[in-house]
Image (cartoon, coloured by chain):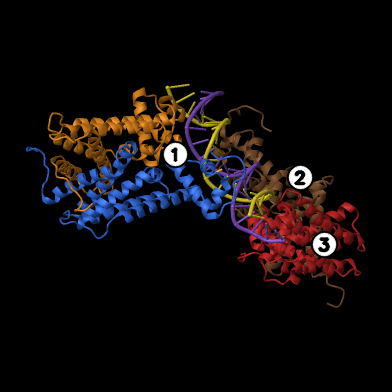
Chain colours: A brown, B red, C blue, D orange, E yellow, F purple
Amino acid sequence: MRTEGRAKRLPRAVRERQIMDAAVDVFSRLGFHSASMDEISEVAGISKPMLYAYLGSKEELFATCIRREATRMMEAIATGVEPDQEPDVQLWSGLRAFFGFVGENRASWQVLHRQASTQGGPFAIELTDMRGRAVSLVAALLTQSTKAPATKLEAESLAAALVGAGESLADWWLDHPEEPAGVVAARLMNLVWMGFGDLVDGNVWHPPSRR
Amino acid sequence: MRTEGRAKRLPRAVRERQIMDAAVDVFSRLGFHSASMDEISEVAGISKPMLYAYLGSKEELFATCIRREATRMMEAIATGVEPDQEPDVQLWSGLRAFFGFVGENRASWQVLHRQASTQGGPFAIELTDMRGRAVSLVAALLTQSTKAPATKLEAESLAAALVGAGESLADWWLDHPEEPAGVVAARLMNLVWMGFGDLVDGNVWHPPSRR
Amino acid sequence: MRTEGRAKRLPRAVRERQIMDAAVDVFSRLGFHSASMDEISEVAGISKPMLYAYLGSKEELFATCIRREATRMMEAIATGVEPDQEPDVQLWSGLRAFFGFVGENRASWQVLHRQASTQGGPFAIELTDMRGRAVSLVAALLTQSTKAPATKLEAESLAAALVGAGESLADWWLDHPEEPAGVVAARLMNLVWMGFGDLVDGNVWHPPSRR
Amino acid sequence: MRTEGRAKRLPRAVRERQIMDAAVDVFSRLGFHSASMDEISEVAGISKPMLYAYLGSKEELFATCIRREATRMMEAIATGVEPDQEPDVQLWSGLRAFFGFVGENRASWQVLHRQASTQGGPFAIELTDMRGRAVSLVAALLTQSTKAPATKLEAESLAAALVGAGESLADWWLDHPEEPAGVVAARLMNLVWMGFGDLVDGNVWHPPSRR
DNA sequence: GATGAATGAGTCTTCATTCAT
DNA sequence: TATGAATGAAGACTCATTCAT
């Protein structure tokens, strides 16, 4: 809550960051619609006109938040991935980085995962885009592996499943923080990669006999 | 669009169903916040006071929608699952039923997956609950299998990952309807079950050497 | 000022008129910008949502007011004019009708003359149009008269001058209501018509001698 | 657009003029309400605090603008009028000066005629005053002429009509700049003076017979 | 003297919700 | 029962105006 009185004068860049932090906080807690500019400005410790002066309309602000958090996450992952290694190692390092990021940036994750996907506004695009890029990346990884999936559709759908599994597991993990990030990441890696390995080896599961 | 004139007197159950159908339609298209009671009543062909008389506040209405659709989906899956079979067969039949339901009930699925998770209100609870039940169910299945995961946490987290993979794949599928439900379901089944199989067989993936 | 309590239920048409009357009143007193929807709704004795439900946005409301008042005035004049008479008689009867209308509808006149011309919005068009039609009408009258002005530009500019003189005189008259409408109208008629008559008779005024 | 950097220190009078020029420009383009102090300060090339330091509140600034432009126009006309001549010559020279001024100072004219009359604020007074002085002047001229109007009211109302005709014709002229100022002025002079002449000569127009 | 940063107060507009018929 | 009519409350956004450096 903002303490009474006039906010101290701060250089523009600092204020902007302060505001964005507040916005990410509020958006992640309440979602886009329920978040009010009033509350954001209050949490940021400034008045509404400043909010508008610095970051434009509510939609613009939200989009900016998403972009910032998405970029931060992408960078965290990119930094974590070991690029010249085998596909499995790349995937593994990516997963570790992903869970690491989520663990240390709950609010970012909530904004990205929960809030953004639903809203029909112009940001849905940003988010869908980013998720699409993630899926494509994983699909490419699968395709590069020693034994690639047969069709592009298959690769993509498996990638989509994997990304969803990661998201869901991340959510689950937020409710069970007693496990370290590495363990959770490894579990998903195993599930997915071993399953994937069998798949391309022709070790296909099939229903008992008839059908 | 509502037809002119005074609505006929109908038995309560029928009216209620009519309204809920309209509500699910509107909520799935617009999301909770953007949906207006005005539009719902219009689509339902009744006046707003009736809406309130029958189904209470907007939040209550939404929660009721979620409950109904969740129940429908659960029942569809329960009906599809073959209960006395091996765990893998149960999972497989469950997945098939799930994708079957999603394919035939887009609106229900959208309400359940997209709209409900975001809203911070009291319905999040309903949804989280249902999802929790699904995860538990799958976890139980895994635990019953010949070689169960070591810990309860492991089983649950794998189940969460699986559920998330299913959701994500369902979404992906809605954008790629050219593939039949069975194919998509089978793909997920394979990925997950073979991975899972390796896992409990001690076939663990691990990073190259050092580390 | 609106008395406390809920407004009585009224049929739509009546309410609409009531609101428009209030709007014309407020707009004529304060002008478009300074008039607030709050005040209009208060004067109308209803709540703001009704205002919006019945008459749309502020701009729409204003445009509707202008259209209504313009139409009323046009009809008053059209009714007053004697169409099959000589041009001078037509002009005279038009002027009488005009001053008659202004005298009995101060608020209408203020909205039309004062408020509408300045605003840059979409209504400026309505107003400019109406004034344009008035000027064209007068110009046509002049052109039909026994001895028409030489050029179209001349006719139009004289008509513009005449219309302006009428408006200005109407304003002046509102501040000097002691004179009857007929007298004021006659005075303008004389000034203009006799001047016009001389003009076309070649009785041109010209500066003393040199220059 | 404001040039970058800190404004040079300038003598007060120069600064003030610079600001007023900007203000007249903006007010004439946008009208009182839509003009923002932000835009004025930007066009003037100074910061808002300076604006306030030099010229006070928005209302004060507007009033000052009106006063300045009104004075300029009055002086232009006063300079143009030939004072010791016959009334008709005085009127003629005044009209010529008036149209000359309008042609060369569109912005001033817009502020004076269009923007000021509408606003209900304290400046309406300034404007009404100035217009009143103009009307009185013309009325005096008419009264001095060889055959004066019978009553003071008559003289004043005719003067008001004449002034309005002038304003309206000036507006019309701004939309038809192809005609030279002199021609337009002469046209009005003729219309009015000849009409006036007839009037005082007893050449009264009157309706056909009956009535 | 000059300004970037800051805000109080207000405007339009919408929506869930409820009377009164 | 069924509804047209009505509203309280809130939210996004803007602007004239002023500190604090």
Q: Position of residue D114 (x, y in %)?
A: 34, 40
Q: Position of residue B190 (x, y in %)?
A: 80, 67
* Mark 1 residue type: Leu
Q: Position of residue B179 (x, y in %)?
A: 70, 71
Measured in 3D between alpha carbons, the distance from the residue under mark 2 to the one under mark 3, in whole angstroms, is 25 Å
Marks counted in the figure total: 3
Judging depth in this view, the residue of B7 and D126 nearest the camera is: B7
Q: Are marks 1 and 2 on the same chain?
A: no
Q: Position of residue B137 (x, y in %)?
A: 86, 60
* Mark 3 residue type: Gly
Judging depth in this view, the residue of D58 and C69 nearest the camera is: C69
Circle 2 residue: A103
Nearer the camera: disc 1 or disc 2: 1
Reply above or below: C53 against D102: below
Other residues around mark 3 within 10 Å, as few (<14) / some (14–19) / many (≥20): many
Q: Chain of mark 3?
A: B
Judging depth in this view, the residue of B97 and A135 nearest the camera is: B97
In the picture, measured across the screen, residue D59 lies left or right of residue A206, that is left
Other residues around mark 1 within 10 Å, as few (<14) / some (14–19) / many (≥20): some
* Mark 2 residue type: Gly
Reply above or below: B90 against D115: below
Marker disc for residue B195: 3
Quadrant assignment, res E7:
top right
Q: Secondary structure at mark 1?
A: helix
Mark 1–mark 2 contact, CB under 8 Å? no
Can residue B98 be seen here? The reply is yes
